[in-house]
Image: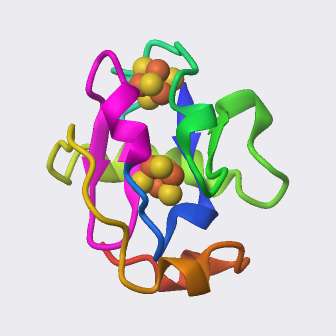
Amino acid sequence: TFVVTDNCIRCKYTDCVEVCPVDCFYEGPNFLVINPDECIDCALCEPECPANAIFSEDEIPAGQEEFLAINEELSGIWPNITEKKDPLPEYEKWDGVSGKIEYLER
Ligand code: SF4
Ligand code: F3S
């Protein structure tokens, strides 16, 4: 599966959802997740993310391993999203800030 990681938080560009052939992105207040049971590993979303927040589960950056479980958990709770929308208002300020998991809203 592919996994959405820390740098999506407070940016949420949503370019990723437009290319997913199985529509397996789910939306929270300031973050998106991928449902690992639905993802078919096509890799199309990875280069679409302006924040470089999407990784194969085998290539999750060190220290961000917990995002695999976070994607699994929250994709079972949050609603599906298939169409791009505007990023969050302060996306430019937050893109590239590390350790945003403390701001993750559920
Ligand atoms: Fe969707 Fe493919 Fe990305 Fe999986 S790897 S979330 S199937 S676009
Ligand atoms: Fe997040 Fe990147 Fe998609 S910032 S919403 S994973 S395009």
Between residue 53 and residue 47, name the one nearer to us: 47
The N terminus sits in image quarter: top right
Residue 36: image x %, image y %? 43, 29
Q: Is residue 70 visible?
A: no
Q: Is residue 64 left or right of residue 46?
A: right
Residue 21: image x %, image y %? 33, 16
User: Which of the 4 quarters of the picture holds residue 86?
Assistant: bottom left
Q: Is residue 59 left or right of residue 25?
A: right
**Residues in magenta?**
15-34
Q: Is residue 86 visible?
A: yes
- Residue shown at the point (62%, 65%) measured from the top left: 7
**Count of marks overlaid on the render:** 0
- Residue shown at the point (32%, 53%) measured from the top left: 74
The C terminus sits in image quarter: bottom left
Q: Is residue 13 above or below residue 105?
A: above
Q: What residue occupies the far right of the structure in this picture?
A: 62
Q: Is residue 32 inside the magenta stretch?
A: yes
Residue 96: image x %, image y %? 71, 73
Residue 59: image x %, image y %? 78, 35
- Residue shown at the point (61%, 64%) measured from the top left: 6
Q: Is residue 73 inside the magenta stretch?
A: no
| Colour setup of the view | rainbow
- Residue shown at the point (49%, 77%) measured from the top left: 91
Q: What residue occupies the far left of the structure in this picture?
A: 79
User: Which of the 4 quarters of the picture holds residue 16?
Assistant: top left
Between residue 71 and residue 30, name the one nearer to us: 30
Q: Is residue 8 left or right of residue 18?
A: right
Q: Is residue 93 above or below residue 62?
A: below
Q: Is residue 79 left or right of residue 16?
A: left
